[in-house]
Image: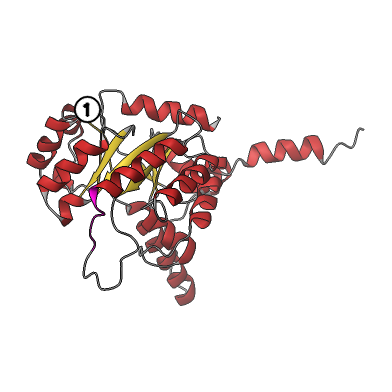
Amino acid sequence: MTATVRRQRLRALLTGDRCYFPASVFDALSARIAEDIGYECGMYAGSVASLAVLGAPDIILLTLSEFAEQARRFGRASALPVIADADHGYGNALNVMRTVEELEHAGLAALTIEDTDLPRPFGAPKPRPLPLAEGIGKMRAAVAARRDSALCILARTGALGMTGLEDALERFRAYQDTGVDGVFLTGVSSMQEVDAFAKEARLPILLGGLPAKLQDREELAARGVRIALQGHHPFMAALSALRATMQALRDGAPLPDTLPKADLDRLSGEALWQARSDDFLDRKGD
């Protein structure tokens, strides 16, 4: 499946009338597992990418090239449409344009650009949003940089948790006029806050870091929410299983359950690669 087709599939989700929970993916097999289960789309987070690639916390240590290369790996392996958390675009508005070019080339279906002042400046005690004018400039630059019109550009703001509802609503209204395809909100903690944004919405809403009490898909869908993240539990569960298995092997204890070989063979395309080997490497009759 081409990247454009994946992007068109994601656009269909954003313009529909349902709310979807994306799978949190971080490598080729996690994307294939999500696709195998039947997820409609995936989310590739900067926090998980930093852990998977660097073993480092989410403090903007990962570079654009490292982030994009990991995206290429699971984009090559799976037809799952994936939304990427492109953080602040790795710099100013011109860096945002470079970020869009790289991540579009990596095959992602959508990417978010946020208006947080990142990396944290010297002397700043806590995260803070960029001036609104700079945030608008970044969103406009992202839209201008894409070459495949099917690629979804999503404005992202965490102002709700930093400067409050009124500032977040002002940014929400402004970003909808920049040409983006939706607005991604973080820090939402109540349905009343969702309602406040829904009243101002002219584009699809995406929510991140949503508490369990708000994960009612029908209620969210009725308010124009099309994508809502449940968190990045799969990666943490994978780490837990890895540690438990290593500890059991070290201690000579019974092993936890592991993926059956038949499932691994199916997910890794064993039969396909065996057929190719038979066709191209073992042509004894030629």
> Magenta stretch containing residue 187, yes or no?
no
Q: Nearer the viewer, residue 127 or 48?
A: 127
Residue 189 is situated, as x and y percent measured from the top left of the image, at: 13, 48
Q: Is residue 129 magenta?
A: yes
Could you tell me which quadrant the C terminus lies in? top right
**Tag 1 residue:** 202
- Main secondary-structure element of the magenta-colored stretch: loop
- Tell me where the magenta segment starts and ends, as one range: 127-132
The residue that appears at 58% across and 44% down in the rendered structure is 268
Could you tell me the amino acid type at mark 1?
A: Arg
On the picture, is 185 further left or further right than 145?
A: left
Residue sitting at the far left = 192
Q: Crowding at label 1, few (<14), some or many (≥20) Cα neighbours within 10 Å?
A: some
* 286 left or right of 166 in image: right
Give SS at disc 1: loop
Question: What residue is at 55 percent from the left and 30 percent from the top?
Answer: 2
- The total of numbered circles placed on residues is 1
* In-image side of 186 versus 45 (left or right): left
Q: Nearer the viewer, residue 195 or 88?
A: 88
Q: Quadrant of residue 278?
A: top right
On the question of residue 230 being in view, the answer is no
* Residue in the image at 39% along x and 55% along y: 46
Instruction: Give the image location of residue 220, x and y in percent.
Output: 18, 33
Q: Is residue 121 visible?
A: yes
Quadrant in the rendering for residue 8: top left
Work out which residue is located at the far bottom of the displayed protein and give it: 251
Task: Residue at 82%, 41% (x, y): give it.
Answer: 281
Farthest residue toward the front?
A: 133
Q: Position of residue 97 (x, y in %)?
A: 46, 45
